[in-house]
Amino acid sequence: MSTTSGVATGEFAQGKPPLNPGKRKSLHDGSGRKAAILIAPTIVLLAIVILYPVVSAVSQSFTKDAGLDPNTGLFVQGGFAGVQNYKLWLLQDCGSGAFSCPPGTLGSQFWTATGVTFLFTVVAVSLETVLGFTFALVMHRKFKGRAILRASVLVPWAIPTAVTAKLWYFIFAYDGIANKILGTDILWTGDGWAPKAAIIIADTWKTAPFMALLILAGLQVIDESVYEAAKMDGATAWQRFKHITLPLVKPALMVAVLFRTLDTLRMYDLPKILTGGAGDTSTLSMLVVDQVRTGFNAASALSTLTFLIVFAVAFIFIKFLGANVTEQRAPKTKKAA
């Protein structure tokens, strides 16, 4: 029932009994069923394209590969393998106990690939965050030619990764421009630290603009009056950056770092084309593709481990570091004394 200036309106004014609570509840139930019917196709589609591949990979990771029996020479079907495929990677167990995989085999490269993947992730994402933040602060200022600068920053990010990898392959060639500018004769795609540095430089060049754009979006929602008030109170530029810019841009910054971290953990095409895995630059994704050619079910186990690593990192970012791509939190306000 609703009233205006003390006059009853609606069904009650027309002499009809008001809806009882039970009737209203049934209307809400009907809306819920309608919503469930409308989103059901989306749920089914997500289950097919996301849940099924994950469940299928986990199932295959506990299965033996079909092939010739080395003892009898006969073809045998695969069967339940237990955790043998996981022991291959985690314990480097090639069938004769822990750490029995000969050097150079794929089974002996899991922990090296994991370390290299995290090395690329930590170093590259850190550099991209610093450079992206710097670019965003510059692009946030008002100056002549700002639109051209913003458009030009997008160029490295818009170039396909394979093209970027080939571009930097020529730059880091033995007789390439990198050695000529530096006056060195470094073999960037050989052994040692050089190939790792080449991959990090190329990845930073390509994706720092992506970080800059996301951080710039966070900067643009900060009210300029906050800075003006801080200036009137005598705050220095560093104090305004530390106490205003950083806290208010943190949600956008954490989402950008989360996206780039997950992308770098899955990095494949850039190191594959640039170095081909030389100098211990094989990432987990490269190891998965190499393993598919020799054993599909063992590759499923490695894919599952990679998925768990990526999931754990994403969980840490969302749960403990405040990166949330779906929920919009209201700003915290101090309680009145």
Image (cartoon, rainbow, N blue to C red):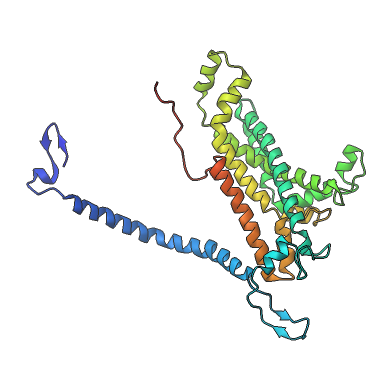
In the picture shown, does residue 208 fall above or below 48?
A: above
The image quarter in which residue 122 lies: top right
Residue in the foreground of this view, choosing between 250 and 107: 107
Q: Position of residue 38 (x, y in %)?
A: 37, 59
Q: Is residue 240 left or right of residue 89?
A: left
| Residue lying at the far left of the rendered structure | 15
Residue at figure coordinates x 32%, y 58% from the top left: 34
Front one among 217 and 72: 72
Q: Residue 155, percent across and down?
A: 68, 43
**What residue is drawn where x is 74% and y is 56%?**
111
* Quadrant showing the N terminus: top left
Q: Residue at x 55, y 25 (%)?
A: 244
Q: Is residue 51 above or below residue 131?
A: below
Q: Is residue 238 left or right of residue 271?
A: left
Q: Position of residue 279 (x, y in %)?
A: 84, 53
Q: Is residue 197 left or right of residue 44?
A: right
The C terminus lies in which quarter of the figure? top left
Q: How many labels, in total?
A: 0
In the figure, 163 relative to 90: above or below? above
Q: Please, is residue 54 above or below residue 168 in the view? A: below
Nearer to me, 148 or 238: 238
Coordinates of residue 60 in the picture (x, y in percent): 62, 70
User: Along the horizontal axis of the image, is 185 left or right of 167?
Assistant: right
